[in-house]
Amino acid sequence: MKTIKTVLGPIAPDELGFTDIHDHVWKSGGMEVLEDSDFKIDSIERSHQELLRFSAAGGKSLIDMQPLGVGRGIEEMKQIVQGTGVHLIAITGFHRGALYDKAHFVYKYSKEQIKKIVYSEVREGIEINDFCGPFTVHSDVLPGLIKCGTSYYKITPLEQKLLEVVAEVSAETGIPIGTHTHYGTMGYEQAQILIRNGALPDKIMIGHLDRNADLEYHKKVLSMGVYVQYDCVARVKYHPVSDTMMLIKKLSELGYADRIMIGGDWGRSSYLQAYGGEPGLEFIPRHMPLMMKEYGIDENIIHKIFIENPKRFLAY
């Protein structure tokens, strides 16, 4: 039977409930943090409190989208989620190339070597030190998703290699794929590469796509049979909320409501209430459904986006 892998163990898809498909509760290192300390989210107690707020607002499940080698903390996540009632999902895979120092193994190892590393996480559990060595210690947590990412309007040779790794691991294991697009670019190309290398379209979610709020481009990406992930729902520095709402309305009218999912991607401490920021993890469950109704989005579509689509996509 297919299950959804969480930090505290597998669950049945019907247990998933209201889902924030992309967010962050722990980020202790990596190039982002080195370049800007606002990206650091490294207090077990504060992140625990943030998850409690998420739960109190009606949130049931959340994916922490921090992948291998950029500050992921699986042992910390196990502590953060305890007693919150939230199904926290950890991931494997990689971010866009610019977030890895040139000394990192992703630049040095062959595609087959990297594939063995990722495959071991999917089958044996997430490695507690992100393969920093010299010893390998797998946790008892299986990843619920595998990630890959690309740069702004380009796919570097490293990113091409990692896309192929992710596609092949997904094809062999069934684990779903979530991608990082930089400002919503290269999503169509990501889908092409992933599918060409064996990934199933209904196990691919193209991320951050509403940061490029071009309806025709979204239709082109969705024509590949993949999911799209929207997370630009309260960041007017990119564009107004109405752009994302109009995308959801128009794409739903075209029959794509079963291919849309939403996350907050509050990946800075200044976005999290327990760290003194706003709007917090509670924003998605507390405010998004109400906002969507105000924009005329039907309750059935809201239910699909936050409950039905995630449980179908994440089960493997």
Image: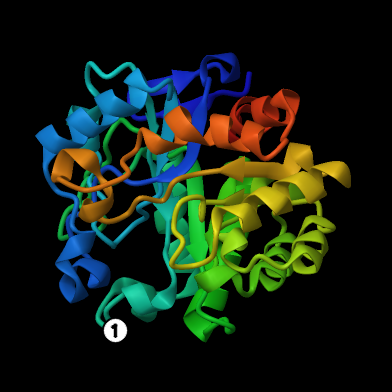
Q: Position of residue 179 (x, y in %)?
A: 55, 59
Q: Nearer the viewer, residue 270 or 267?
A: 270
Residues 288 and 153: in front is: 288
Instruction: Name which quarter of the figure residue 37 lies in.
Output: bottom left
Q: Residue at x 41, y 28 (%)?
A: 6
Which residue occupies the extreme front position in the image?
294
Number of numbered labels in the structure image: 1
Assess disc 1: are there few (<14), some (14-19) or many (≥20) residues with their C-alpha within 10 Å of its C-alpha: few
Quadrant of image for the C terminus: top right
Q: Is residue 257 above or below residue 241?
A: above
- Which x, y percent locates residue 220? 82, 65
Q: Residue at x 49, y 44 (%)?
A: 263
Task: Give the image location of residue 270, x and y in percent.
Answer: 22, 54
**Residue 118 showing in the rendered view:** yes
Quadrant in which residue 63 is drawn: top left
Label 1 sits on residue: 102
Residue displayed at 56% across by 36% down: 291
181 above or below 64? below
Can residue 255 be seen here? no
Residue 266 located left or right of residue 253:
left
Colour setting: rainbow
Q: Amino acid at mark 1?
A: Lys
Could you say whether the residue bearing mark 1 is in a helix, strand or loop? loop
In this picture, is 306 found above or below 127?
Answer: above
Quadrant in the picture for the N terminus: top right
| Nearest the eye: 122 or 17 | 17
* Rendered residue at 24%/46% (across/down): 26
Q: Residue furthest right?
A: 254
Horizontal side, residue 125 vs residue 224: left or right:
left
Please tell me which residue lies in front, 277 or 208: 277
> In the shown orientation, is residue 230 left or right of residue 131?
right
